[in-house]
Amino acid sequence: MIDKPCGLAVHPGRAGGPSGEDFFPEWRVGRDGPWLAHRLDRDTSGCLLVALKKSALLAAQGLFARGAVEKTYWAVVRGTPKAALGVIDLPLGKVTQGRQWKMAVDRSAGAAVTEWEVKGRGAGIAWVDFRPKTGRTHQIRAHAALLGTPIIGDEVYGDGGDKLCLLARRLHVPLDPPVLASATVPAHMIEAMRSCGYAE
């Protein structure tokens, strides 16, 4: 498990630049690998599972596909949800406009379910715990915006302006033995988190 920083792509992009895979030669334990067991957006920080063995990769991918992996994300959002907690059950599909794309509600698309809970409130912002039950692209970012509280720094679903305040906080993968990891709150989120009641 690695703690991926905001701004680092997991795969090499067309435009070049650093990516998580740049470190793979240092982590290799055999002739092949390592492999990414799942993905995070470039601007999302936090827990990223890397498999050093092919057998572990296949087992982890199977658990992700079956929804057996417990994922917890922390976000700082603009605005404050009216309720203290809830469930967003809105299917998401990809919408393309020119060279840009985003996820939007699409009743014909695959299910997208996210549980959420407000952990703290500040001046016009809130610290929200998101627990996705499905793994759609941009699911938390799109669902947060549909809740009326886009994530701070989100240029696609919000007003951008800052780094994306979204952290893959915790990951529990029920392998044998199980993998349980927590990521630290990144520097660009810490002051906003504190203003919402977070204490290290």
Image: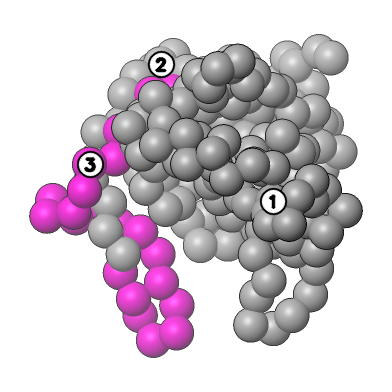
Q: Which of disc 2 and disc 3 is earlier in sequence? A: 2
Task: Answer with left or right where residue 108 lies relative to residue 30.
Answer: left
Q: Residue furthest front?
A: 31
Residue pictured at 13% horizontal, 51% vertical: 107
Q: Position of residue 178 (x, y in %)?
A: 58, 17
Which region shows up in magenta? Answer: 95-116
Q: Which of disc 1 and disc 3 is earlier in sequence? A: 1
The answer to which quarter of the image holds residue 21 is bottom right
Residue pictured at 80% horizontal, 68% vertical: 18
The residue tagged with tag 2: helix, strand or loop? strand
- Which quadrant is the C terminus positioned in? top right
Q: Position of residue 44 (x, y in %)?
A: 65, 48
Q: Is residue 113 magenta?
A: yes
What's the CA distance linking mark 1 and mark 2? 38 Å
Q: Is residue 170 above or below residue 2?
A: above
User: Can you tell which mark lies on residue 111?
Assistant: 3
Q: Which of disc 2 and disc 1 is earlier in sequence? A: 1
Residue pictured at 57% horizontal, 36% vertical: 56
Q: Which residue is mark 1?
A: 34
Q: Is residue 27 above or below residue 155?
A: above
Q: Residue furthest left?
A: 108
